[in-house]
Amino acid sequence: MEVEKLKEVTVLYCEDETELHDVTANLLRRLAKTVLTAHDGEEGLRLYREHQHEIDMVITDIGMPKMNGLEMTRQIKEITPRIPVIVTTAYSSTDHLFEAIDIHVDKYVLKPLDTRKLVEAMIQSLLYHELRSLYRDPLTGLLTRNALLNDLKKTKSNRLVLINIEHFAHINDLYGDEVGGNALVGLTEKLRETFSKTFEIYRTGFDSFVLFDLQMDRTSDSIRHLLETFAEACKNDGMVIEEIPIYLVLTFAMAYSDDGHTLYYVQRAMQKANENHQKFIEYNPRSNGNISDRETNIWWTKELDSAIEHGRFKPFFQPIVDTETLKTYKYEALVRYQGTEGKLFGPVVFLGIAKKTNLYPMVMRVVLHKVIEVIQKKKIRVAVNISYVDLINRDTMTFIDQMLRQHPEEAAYIEFEILESEKIDNYDLAGDFIRSVRRYGCQVGIDDFGTGYSNFGMIEALNVDYVKINGLLIQGIHESDRQALIVETIHTFCKKLGIRTVAEMVSCEEEYLVVKRIGIDLTQGWYVSREIDCAEIADG
């Protein structure tokens, strides 16, 4: 089985004795995938430089003309320190042995060659071939992300350039994976021609590359000029793959740091570049604040995990009143995180991080548990926010169904407000949820309606019980005829469908009077009441 693995290996074989060279080369060709042969050290070194990204091991004689095998090995090891080298020689002198050890020769096989021993030495050197794919990209021959991470450990001060190919997937879709792969190989050659003398080059993803700066004394402006020139050449000159002209548009992000987090910074910079449609962006933590978002995210992730375990999420309740009578009709549950020192944090601080981790569904479960407990004590109607993330999470949907089934009396007091309704592109999914909770007597509404991509067709398609109008349309409504017209249009449309309306973020009497004049059914906001603790709610 081990011998079979040699069929995946590329070998460089160097031997000056013609007969031995031919016999051994033929043997190696039966064993290995590819065999490159040379008759002297200079030729061997040239072949290695040309094919260094393909060669998995070197087998060489010592005594050869022009350049001996040990000197050739020394120079090869300077290029690729981990490449395994097997030395074959008729010399058994201690000097040659010590020199071979000094330049890190892996195996030492004496002549006349014993085929079995040579094969054993090759098999023992296979580990490099097997690990090579972790550090060398098989398509481009570039170093991989694993190699980059390993190299970054060697120094905390470094400068990286991240390169992304815009819409590269379109090339694969249009012309096939083979053309796309050849385009990456072509770009790799251009990168080597331009950057290999002063940068280490890595392929770190499907359509991304990283340049590791080897000359830290350069100015960032000089690097930017080099990158922009390179980008223009790729965009304007292009390359021809199978008679197809390919033009690549590149985005660059550059980051420098001396805190060991440069890769994180450059990835963050690339994200900003893509969001803002920039072709080049530079990130330097010295000029972008001392506290990294990474540390903040890690801290909050740990805090949220602990809060779930120790019950530090606390529900507050904001009254929603009848607009005409100002009597409380129901409450909206608002989750707060309570720190170890008692300080309360609103959802705007932590929900974003929770949604990017697996913690968000757990927050939803905690809130629903506590809402049911409050309903049992106070007998009040409570609206619970449910996001698009929840709707597409099968486990969350199962949990909600179980909780409602186990608490049928309390379920009739629960309403669900669908957040992020603009993200809903599958009305059947949302409709299934609405029908499932209505079986338990729950009502369902749409939150934050009226801005972004909200549309009236969704109201009719989902057949909800009420629509909560976005607070941005309510704030200042007494000073904007346009806002008043939009709110009145929403209310009129809903009224004709028999759907109630709720105005949120009503903060002053002037706003309230406009909302009342339009005929909005329910009102919520600081003009009516701030959020209150469960203990402040009167018993039902």
Image: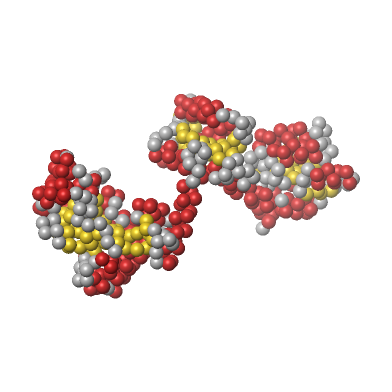
Viewer-closest of 80 and 214: 214
Q: Quadrant of residue 58?
A: top right
293 left or right of 258?
Answer: left
Q: Can residue 417 be seen here?
A: no
Question: How far from the left and from the top, in percent, is residue 280?
Answer: 46, 33
| For residue 145, side relative to residue 35 (left or right) | left
Looking at the image, which residue is at 72% across and 53% down? Answer: 123
| Residue 451 or residue 292, whichever sits in front | 292
Q: Is residue 217 above or below residue 375?
A: above
At 49% from the left and 46% from the top, the residue drawn is 291
Split into 4 quadrants, where in the image is the N terminus? bottom right
Give the camera-side residue of 384 and 323: 323
Q: Position of residue 77 (x, y in %)?
A: 73, 41
Instruction: Evaluate whether residue 154 shows in this view.
Output: yes
The quarter of the picture where residue 173 lies is: top left
Q: Position of residue 535 (x, y in %)?
A: 28, 68
User: Relative to residue 75, is residue 333 drawn left or right?
Assistant: left
- Image label count: 0
Quadrant housing the C terminus: bottom left
Q: Is residue 91 left or right of residue 301?
A: right
Please state the horizontal and vertical placement of residue 154, each as a whole percent of the image: 64, 45
Work out whether 405 lies above or below 341: below
Residue at 51% in and 40% down: 285
Q: How is the image coloured?
A: secondary structure
Q: Give the answer, above or below, for where 384 lies relative to 423.
A: below
Question: Considering depth in this image, is 210 or 131 the residue closer to the camera?
Answer: 210
Residue depicted at x 17% and y 62%: 328
